[in-house]
Amino acid sequence: MRPENSPGGRQRSFIEEARRRQIIASAVEVISEVGYGNASLARIAKHAGVSKGVISYHFEGKDDLMTQLVIQLYVSGAEYMVPLIAAAEGARNRLRAYLESNLSFIEANRNYVAAMTDVVMNLRDSEGKRTFDDPNGEREILDPLVLMLREGQEGGDFGEFDAVIMAKSIRDSIDSAAGRSIREPDFDMSKYSAHLCKVFDSATRKAGRDR
């Protein structure tokens, strides 16, 4: 995988970064149209209106491009969600913001989520193992949520429960919504979001707390 800087160690220019994002966006569209297996660099280059050489300058081949596609979605998601969660006051409102921002991001990026899922299921390392089958990756997503839940318990907003199990339940519900948004074109994310917020507010709220 290339470092964050350009070849030679220099910082990427705005134009170079924009080109990388353009190529990744084209990869998303091609995967959405023909699937991961048929998403060749030649097809991606044609969709992007560039030569394969341009892709090779910015990425070390298809595997690197696909890896960066997945990383970019997580980066974009964090850029969207973190400020919304941080702006919420109180543990219960932060949990609601966490759920709503995750689900609204998925809704706004259905094609990208579908392409990323295809990549995650198919991209493999030299030993044939899935590249993204890494327990550390799940922990990086779960740990901040576990911390949020525990802080809510310590502050008296949340009741007694296993924060790790609750965090996994929340993440499984979000990931399930991502899957449904891919399989069901008419899946109503806003209704699902409202339902999930009520479910987990009830599940986490300390007994006797006002609604």
Image (tube, helix red, strand yellow):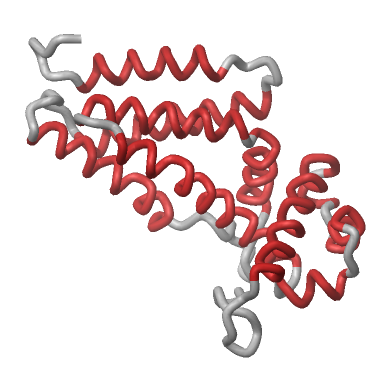
In the picture, which quadrant includes the N terminus? bottom right
From the viewer's side, name the closer residue of 54 and 140. Answer: 54
In the picture, which quadrant includes the C terminus? top left
Q: Is residue 147 left or right of residue 21?
A: left
Q: Is residue 184 left or right of residue 37?
A: left
From the viewer's side, name the closer residue of 44 and 21. Answer: 21
Q: Is residue 84 left or right of residue 206?
A: right
Q: Is residue 40 left or right of residue 152?
A: right
Which residue is at the far bottom? 8
Q: Position of residue 107 (x, y in %)?
A: 59, 28
Vertical side of 186 occupied by 55: above or below: below
Q: Position of residue 86 (x, y in %)?
A: 30, 41
From the viewer's side, name the closer residue of 194 and 132. Answer: 194
Q: Which residue lies at the image location 27% right of the left edge and 26% below the top edge?
A: 93
Q: Which residue lies at the image location 52% right of the left edge and 17% below the top edge?
A: 190
Q: Position of residue 44 (x, y in %)?
A: 84, 57
Vertical side of 94 occupied by 115: above or below: below
Q: Which residue lies at the image location 13% right of the left edge and 25% below the top edge?
A: 157
| Residue 57: quarter of image | bottom right
Q: How many marks?
A: 0
Q: Position of residue 127 (x, y in %)?
A: 61, 68
Q: Which residue lies at the image location 44% right of the left edge and 32% below the top edge?
A: 101
